[in-house]
């Protein structure tokens, strides 16, 4: 859903992108005198300027046209804002979902809520269309439940014209602000040095892998064609699409050696059965296996490692491992 302003006043939404969707993030903190500006971060207080009408996004304690319980979202000219002392009505908190303190705002991936500082309403839309005077577009209003799940937005694109930014920090959606003057603000043409892989001992690698598996799979919300159930893995019924790269058609697909895997599975099953039968017989005073050949009844290491691996997928809500890149340093290590 793209945000636009109808006749410089009513804020509405529609699904396609055009120049009416361009907004600029205005900082409420001083920008550094040199450098690339300042990155917008979680919980920053910002203003939004609509580029085409040169007005600032505003909400106030006035009912929206189609929903009396919610607040109207409109815009105001910067000079009029100063004359009427309405600066506070144009301030919004940027709340990035599942973000840590100081986390940078990213396009596409940085889903967020925009919460009004003064009234605590959240930027929101609904399916009911506005009347013909607004071309039956969707209304944008302020939901008084600031944590409403459907009041979630994301940045669609960064806007450039003729090889440079049309205005500092302009974006289709919202992203970053700062001076441009024709410079490569996002350093997309500069030489990128490869990241040096940080060495870690085995225990740290093991702990990081477990943590990443839990974090990545707990965030999955939908199925995909490459999904496999964890119960299939010990029996080699299907493999795991661990990592893919669409541009180069490369993929890491984890699957065990069929002969070796099933030999181990059968051997462990026979071993476990013999140990279980021996322990049960000894409780009844029978010793089918001589004392000198008896097995240690303590849990073997193999009985702990496989369940520990599976718990990273089974104990979270999303139990289907995705085929996309794994987050963090693990992907870098695998690609090298």
Image (spheres, rainbow, N blue to C red):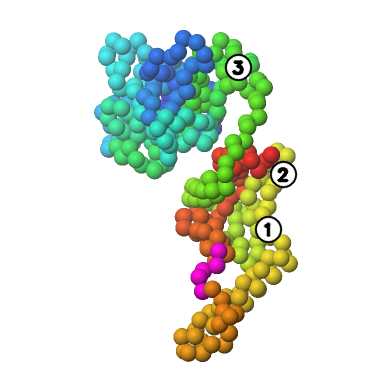
Q: Earlier in the sequence, mark 3 or mark 1?
A: 3
3 and 1 marks in contact (CB < 8 Å): no
Q: Name the foreground residue: 18 vs 94.
A: 94
- Circle 2 residue: 250
- Circle 3 residue: 184
Marks 2/1: CA–CA distance: 16 Å
Marks 3/1: CA–CA distance: 44 Å
Q: Name the foreground residue: 125 vs 45.
A: 45
Q: Measuring 55% from the left and 67% from the top, which residue is drawn there?
A: 300
Marks 3/2: CA–CA distance: 30 Å
Task: Indicate whether 265 appears above or below 79.
Answer: below
Expressed as whole percent of the image width and height from the top left, the position of residue 202 reads 57, 48
Q: State which quarter of the image contains the C terminus.
A: top right
Q: Measuring 29% from the left and 20% from the top, which residue is drawn there?
A: 88
Q: Name the foreground residue: 198 vs 219.
A: 198
Q: Which residues are magenta?
A: 297-301
- Circle 1 residue: 255
- Dividing the picture into quadrants, the one containing residue 57 is top left
Dot 1 falls on a residue whose secondary structure is: loop
Q: Measuring 45% from the left and 13% from the top, which residue is drawn there?
A: 32
2 and 1 marks in contact (CB < 8 Å): no
């Amino acid at each position: 859903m793209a945000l636009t302003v109808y006749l410089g006043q009513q804020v509405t939404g529609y699904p396609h992108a055009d120049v009416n969707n361009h907004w600029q993030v205005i900082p409420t903190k001083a920008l550094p005198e040199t450098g690339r500006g300042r990155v917008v971060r979680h919980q920053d207080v910002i203003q939004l300027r609509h580029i085409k009408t040169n007005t600032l996004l505003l909400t106030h304690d006035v009912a929206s046209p189609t929903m009396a319980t919610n607040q109207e979202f409109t815009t105001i000219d910067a000079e009029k804002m100063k004359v009427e002392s309405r600066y506070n009505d144009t301030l919004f908190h940027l709340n990035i979902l599942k973000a840590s303190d100081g986390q940078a705002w990213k396009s596409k991936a940085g889903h967020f809520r925009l919460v009004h500082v003064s009234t605590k309403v959240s930027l929101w839309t609904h399916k009911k269309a506005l009347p013909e005077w607004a071309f039956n577009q969707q209304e944008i209003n302020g939901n008084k439940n600031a944590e409403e799940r459907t009041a979630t937005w994301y940045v669609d694109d960064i806007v450039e014209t003729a090889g440079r930014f049309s205005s500092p920090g302009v974006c289709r959606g919202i992203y970053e602000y700062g001076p441009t003057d024709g410079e490569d603000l996002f350093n997309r043409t500069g030489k990128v040095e490869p990241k040096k892989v940080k060495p870690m001992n085995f225990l740290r690698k093991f702990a990081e892998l477990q943590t990443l598996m839990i974090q990545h799979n707990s965030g999955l919300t939908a199925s995909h064609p490459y999904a496999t159930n964890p119960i299939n893995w010990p029996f080699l019924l299907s493999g795991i699409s661990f990592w893919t790269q669409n541009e180069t058609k490369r993929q890491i697909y984890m699957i065990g050696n069929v002969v070796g895997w099933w030999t181990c599975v059968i051997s462990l099953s026979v071993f476990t059965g013999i140990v279980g039968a021996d322990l049960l017989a000894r409780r009844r005073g029978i010793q089918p296996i001589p004392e000198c050949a008896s097995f240690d009844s303590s849990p073997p290491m193999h009985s702990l490692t496989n369940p520990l691996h599976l718990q990273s997928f089974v104990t979270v809500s999303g139990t289907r491992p995705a085929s996309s890149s794994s987050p963090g340093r693990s992907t870098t290590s695998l690609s090298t």
